[in-house]
Amino acid sequence: MVMKCSDVKKLLMPFVEGALDESLAHKVGEHLKACSDCAREAEALAETVTALREADVPAMEPAANMRSRVMAGIASEPVRRGWWTGRVQAWSAAAAVVLFAGVLMVSLRHGAFEGAPQSAMESLDRAEPPAAYAPAAPLEESAPEPELNDRIVMKEPSKEMKKSVSLPEEAPVRQEAKEKSPVAEGEKGAALGRKDAPAEAAAEADKFGFSPAAETTAASKAEPAPAAPSGGGDSLDSVAAGDLRKAEANGAAAVDEAKKPDDRTLELEKTLSENPDHEGTLLALVKDYRRVGRSQDEYAVADRLTKLKPDNAGYWFMRAQAAERAKLPNEAAASYKKAIELKVAEPNLSLSRSRLEVLEKSTGSGEAGSR
Amino acid sequence: MVDKLKDNFADSDAGLVRRAKAGDAQAFGDLVTLHERSVYGIVSRMVRDRDEADDLVQEIFISAFRAIGGFRETAKFSTWLHSIAVNTTLKRLKRMKRERGVSIDDEETGLADRLESEDVMSPQEAVELSERSESVKRAVDSLPDKQKIVVVMHYFEEMPCEEIAQILGCSVGTVWSRLHYACIRLKGELRNVNSVV
């Protein structure tokens, strides 16, 4: 089936990100071979996505006193009761009214209370359900933007999303923080994992005016949200350091940034122990090890990726960068060579060439690397 | 401190949420500690002023505390929290723009330029990457808020599109569509500032 340009253009973003299922991706790929207009647009999108992925746009460090600020803010909130407490009390009241009304009716039947007031029945009628929490204002929606054709099946991008955005492969790697203290070489054992975001029903979303999500396809239990990756090292930047001083000056409790454990890494390692060849987890772990400065581990995981996908130029580039950080120049040179041979996308291709040149000069050999 | 929390609860979020719903403010404080980084990840890339970001994050968590009684534990707490973060941030931005009449000038970014000199990059390469990052940052700042926030969540916070769809309460197709239009716009902006794209 030949796809029309209008349908293909709607699929270009997930296509570029490797989020389409194989058969649909193949159809789009075939169209791009024949249609230079769509191919140009796909290429442009891929370049933009690469630029976004490589850009270093770090988030601010949390204010050192944020917890105490929030606690101070909620200190004045009314004492929260369990949701069931209010309901039980309300229904208990309603039950009491019903009972009273029943007794009254029996009494009326037997003429005990002539001219009995209607107030009991009226009270029953007026019994109100438990007060509901006021929903937050719904997210305002502007004029809807054109949507993808949802009838076209897409596979779960969370499981298959690749780093590569060029057509067809490459996984450009961002230059990240410099190496911290080295760790013994070799792969680590079992580790925590980070599950890819499951398709869970946002059952409470209607609280904020959202329409209910589609039925849960793979509901999983709630898990701690991993910490967002920072763009660089772990030390406080000057802004956060200023906040810390302010917090101390105010006598507020300050969070000890240096002692915060790495929940995200533990989660990823656990997932990997359950599924050692899960590409998405391996990619996330490479980045995470890089973030926390565990260069040897970063290299070990990058190495595993190249064994998993030996034809992926981006993974070889990733392995090369990790090898440099882990002070393994021969492995780095070999990996750069492989990345060049497999034509890794720019700017990584130029970077590979220049780094290889530097490495070969420093090792005094053009035959550096073995693999 | 976070380690201690995890030691106490096998499933830290679920346990803390249950306690917070029952009125345990300290449990909610622990949730703040666990999730503040991810909330800053969204907020601080949308609102460049340090004080504004801190105020907004505080407001988000206080709103979450007020609403936690209605949180149904069938979904992830983080997704629910992020939906509050997005909602509150977009409203704040709208109000700020209305009050100021113009787009927010982000000269005072409050963001540290994290690019550190690396052994693996030459100084020239480091400078080039820094310049490209600045170009991308400026280009992303020029996006309409609803496109910008999906870019922030997907490319900088690395959230998959299904999670973003749950946070925003829209379809996955809509998320891809916003990303598509954002990238088209970014391409033009990046060309204008003479970056690598």
Image (cartoon, rainbow, N blue to C red):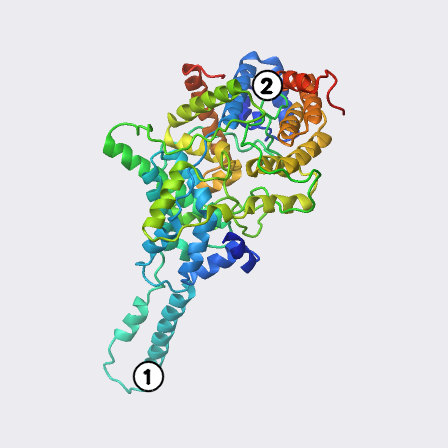
**Looking at the image, which residue is at 62% across and 27% down?**
A321
Q: Earlier in the sequence, mark 1 or mark 2?
A: 1
**Looking at the image, which residue is at 48% across and 26% down?**
B180
> Where residue A260 sits: x, y (%)?
51, 48
B54 vs A354: above or below: below
- Badge 1 sits on which subunit? A
Q: Residues within 10 Å of mark 1 (few under 14, many from 20)?
A: few
Which one is in front, B49 or B127?
A: B127
As helix, strand or loop, the secondary structure at mark 2 comes to helix
Distance from Cα at disc 1 to Cα at disc 2: 95 Å
Residue A34 seen in the figure:
yes
With A5 as the anchor, is A126 left or right in this view? left
Which one is in front, B99 or B106?
A: B106
Establish whether labels 1 and 2 are both on one chain: yes
With A113 as the anchor, is B183 left or right in this view? right
> Where residue A137 sits: x, y (%)?
34, 46
**Looking at the image, which residue is at 60% across and 47% down?**
A266
Residue A351 badge: 2
Residue A202 seen in the figure:
no
**Amino acid of disc 2:** Leu
With A24 as the anchor, is A242 left or right in this view? left
Q: Which residue is mark 1?
A: A109
**Amino acid of disc 1:** Arg
Residue B130 badge: none
As helix, strand or loop, the secondary structure at mark 1 comes to helix
> Where residue A174 sits: x, y (%)?
55, 27
Q: Residues within 10 Å of mark 2 (few under 14, many from 20)?
A: some
